[in-house]
Image: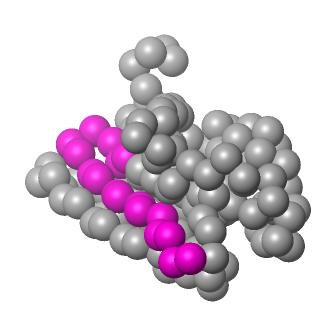
């Protein structure tokens, strides 16, 4: 296990093809720390779902979503941040397959795959932070 903290920062647009790159980056970091295949896939899928939810918030004027992957001694954190638009329902209907799953279903799927999910909204930006511990989360013992 690598105890050195690293940070990977990605920016992406509404192009659904970019989700594979985000998932690959997340799974690579998880692999470096010895997570099992199932744990890596769970974290990658959860990050992909969070990115899909963020894409719904992106407008057609070039707004970007930020993904930050931090690894620490005991965990990996994936932060997905996007602008919060009041007209998200209109944007959502224009995204076709991106919006096929409801936000509630997507959040339930995410929460099943990681150890902790934190959310906040600040200065017109919405952020979700996914946490996967390398060992069993002490609060769940």
Residue nearest the observer in this picture, 86 or 97: 86
Residue 109 visible here: no
Identify which residue is drawn at 63% across, 76% down: 60
On screen, 101 above or below 61? above
Which one is in front, 70 or 17?
Answer: 17
Q: State left or right for residue 12 relative to residue 112.
A: left
Q: Would you identify the image quadrant in which residue 50 lies?
A: bottom right
Q: Quadrant of the N terminus?
A: bottom left
Magenta region includes residue 76: yes
- Between 64 and 113, the one lying in front of the other is 64
Q: Residue 138 location, x and y as percent? A: 40, 19
Residue 12: x %, y % from top left: 48, 75
- Magenta extent: 61-77
Rendered location of residue 96, percent (x, y): 85, 73
Left or right placement of residue 118 versus residue 105 in this view: left
Q: Is residue 37 above or below residue 60?
A: above
Q: Position of residue 110 (x, y in %)?
A: 65, 45
Q: Is residue 58 left or right of residue 131?
A: right
User: Does residue 139 show up magenta in the picture?
Assistant: no
């Amino acid at each position: 296990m690598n105890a050195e903290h690293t940070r990977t920062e990605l920016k992406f647009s509404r192009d659904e093809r970019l989700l594979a790159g985000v998932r690959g980056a997340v799974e690579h970091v998880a692999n470096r720390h010895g997570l099992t295949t199932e744990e890596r896939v769970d974290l990658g899928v959860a990050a992909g779902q969070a990115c899909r939810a963020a894409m719904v918030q992106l407008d057609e004027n070039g707004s970007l979503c930020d993904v930050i992957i931090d690894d620490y001694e005991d965990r990996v954190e994936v932060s997905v941040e996007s602008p919060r638009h009041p007209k998200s329902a209109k944007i959502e209907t224009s995204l076709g397959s991106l919006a096929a799953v409801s936000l509630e279903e997507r959040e339930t799927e995410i929460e099943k795959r990681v150890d902790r999910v934190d959310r906040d909204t600040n200065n017109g930006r919405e952020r979700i932070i996914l946490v996967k511990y390398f060992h069993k989360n002490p609060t769940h013992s």
